[in-house]
Image: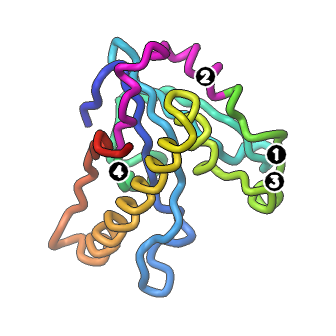
Amino acid sequence: MPLEPNSLYICTLPIPTNLGSAGAPARAFHWGLIHVDSASHCSLHEWAEDPVDGTECYQSHNLPDGAMPIISSSFVVGYFKVPGYTDSPQVVDRSHFQAVCDVCEEGPRRLPAVNRAHGISCRTFVRQVIAFFTNQDRAVAIENRVHNVSYAEADILHECNGNLDQRRFNCRVHSLDDVQ
């Protein structure tokens, strides 16, 4: 999927434990950030569980094939271009973006249940990074739009998964330019 250089995108993926449970579409999503540098190299930045010890932390992964409709065997519900990032004087290369994510890291490494009890999740991590480049109010407005569109797209994805022979889910890139 072609994404614009010097851009930042939010991506959402349905959390596997909620896929198709009781015949219902996903209602929880993993949130990540896709950073695209000036050479169109993509990297995924996320608050995720460390497979070594089970704690959560900031992680960064190179995406050598660029943005794809499937990441780690899960359909991407959508890519959401963060408005204003391209025009921001703070547009940064990957190493500087990683430093921003390090600053926004949501506290010490803890198990997921402990983090949720403290209100820390992949979604709140994404909001903090977005707020770094915009402001808190706009970050919340962007978060709410991504959440609502992800729900709608998850309904379509669920329907497609039930009818794989008849339809194919098309992951889309969404503009958030109208979010204030």
Question: Does dot 2 land on a helix, a strand or a loop?
Answer: helix
Q: Which residues are magenta?
A: 80-101
Q: Amino acid at mark 4?
A: Gly
The residue that label 1 is drawn on is 53
Answer with the quarter of the image where residue 3 lies. top left
Residue 39 is covered by the magenta coloring = no
Q: Earlier in the sequence, mark 1 or mark 2?
A: 1
Residue ID at (51%, 17%): 94
Q: Amino acid at mark 1?
A: Asp
**Label 2 packing within 10 angstroms: few (<14), some (14-19), many (20+):** some
Q: Amino acid at mark 2?
A: Gln
Q: Earlier in the sequence, mark 3 or mark 2?
A: 2
The residue that label 4 is drawn on is 78
Which quarter shows the C terminus?
A: top left
Above or below for 75 versus 25 = above
Measured as percent of width and height from the top left, residue 20 is found at 44, 77
Q: Earlier in the sequence, mark 1 or mark 4?
A: 1
Disc ID at residue 111: 3
Q: Earlier in the sequence, mark 2 or mark 4?
A: 4
Task: Estimate the spatial distance between the alpha carbons at disc 1 and disc 2, rounded to whole Å.
Answer: 22 Å
Disc ID at residue 98: 2
**Label 1 packing within 10 angstroms: few (<14), some (14-19), many (20+):** few
Label 1 or label 2, whichever lies nearer to me, is 2
